[in-house]
Amino acid sequence: MRVFQVEDAWSMENVRINTRPEPEPRSGQVRLRMKASALNYRDLLVPLRGYGSRMKALPLIMLSDGLGIVESVGEGVSNLSIGDRVCPLFFQSWISGEPNKKRLSLSLGCELDGTMAELMVLPEEGVALAPEHLDDMAAASLPSAAVTAWRALVTEGRVKPGDTVLVQGTGGVSLFALQFAKLLGAFVIVTSSSDEKLARVRAMGADETINYRKVPEWGKRARDIAGKDGVDHIVEVGGQATLPQSLRAVRAGGTISMIGVLSGGIMDVPLGPIVTRHVRLQGITVGSRDDFVAMAAAIARHQLHPVIDQVFAFEELHAALDRLSSGRHFGKICIAH
Ligand SMILES: NC(=O)c1ccc[n+]([C@@H]2O[C@H](COP(=O)([O-])OP(=O)(O)OC[C@H]3O[C@@H](n4cnc5c(N)ncnc54)[C@H](OP(=O)(O)O)[C@@H]3O)[C@@H](O)[C@H]2O)c1
């Protein structure tokens, strides 16, 4: 079978197409014929060994997100049938409950081979049914970015109707966060570097927008917009450069979901206000199988559609990664197998 993998050394140049023997499902496993994959920011770091010594030894098949059709099942598989459309789950051993070291230890496209393969063999509980109304690309975009936004706002955040949510930027996680926050009845403020992208998020239902390039002190602006004491919940993807503004925007007792470090990973903020204003800094790294299943049910119930930026062919993975690193994308970048 064809695969797209980091081959014999950690570098972007060593991400190449190759072949591997076709895997067979053993007891409790299913074999998927992959139809689609989707990219996330981390896929730019993986070829550079950005996640360190915990990563699988080379060769490593790229990408964590995808959609496949169950093609054959091993002995004892009871919850899935041939023909089912499923998403491989980002964390293969986080089924339910709170995160712990073991549950966070096996992610696709990092510690384990990823979705850029014609076939994947995974444990039955390592996949979940995709929402039926979504096409292959839209379903492939769910396992990482959408589950991250769901875990931040729903499982951990418990956002309520009437809350004010601030979403940073218009990347994959952030657009799902906007969609889920609207679903929950929140008032949503979105920041972006681009007025054109801000017009697009307004069309999606964002209530207020701020261009963070034109308004560097956007934290104060967001706090004024939110009224009362400030924003209830902030989806923080910028990290080092954005956290000081998030801390100006958030209300006393509010939550900042710490999801990304796009502008740097060192915390350089006065800690006093976090303490005295009871601000909750909540780390988020995707979520569990239960999170995926609950999210997929909500997406199906509300007929929600992920935003797709562009679809590339299997052979065009490098062009897809270039599109992601350009930052010009709006929505998920997908690969048709
Ligand atoms: N995807 C996942 O499943 C996942 C899961 C856990 C954590 N994360 C982390 O979350 C972050 C975002 O991931 P992603 O996959 O959503 O990335 P992405 O699709 O590449 O989105 C990047 C977007 O973030 C915005 N951005 C960049 N720098 C910013 C800044 N200083 N302030 C505000 N916005 C900024 C930009 O939006 P504008 O173009 O609108 O300015 C940019 O388009 C990454 O650090 C990633 O490691 C991602």
Image: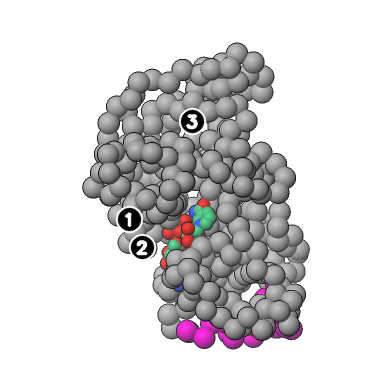
Query: Up-down: is 227 above or below 235?
Result: below
Q: Which residue is mark 2?
A: 328
| Structural crowding at the residue carrying mark 3, measured as other residues with C-alpha within 10 Å and reported as few (<14), some (14–19) or many (≥20) | many
> Which amino acid, mark 3?
Gly
As helix, strand or loop, the secondary structure at mark 1 comes to helix
Identify the residue shown where x is 37% and y is 63%.
327
Q: Amino acid at mark 2?
A: Arg
Q: Is residue 221 left or right of residue 53?
A: right
Q: Secondary structure at mark 3?
A: strand
**Residue with the mark numbered 1:** 323
**Residue that badge 3 annotates:** 68
User: Compared with residue 278, is residue 322 higher up or lower down, i.e. above or below?
Assistant: above
Is residue 96 among what the camera can see? yes
Q: Is residue 287 left or right of residue 67?
A: right
Q: Magenta stretch containing residue 218, yes or no?
A: yes
Q: Secondary structure at mark 2?
A: loop
- Residues at circles 2 and 3 in contact by the CB criterion of under 8 Å: no
Which segment is the magenta one? 215-232
Q: Earlier in the sequence, mark 2 or mark 3?
A: 3
Q: Is residue 148 magenta?
A: no
Q: As displayed, is residue 59 above or below residue 43?
A: above
Residue type at mark 1 is: Arg
Q: Callout 2: few (<14), some (14-19), or many (20+) C-alpha neighbours within 10 Å?
A: some
| Residue at (74, 76) in percent of width and height | 278
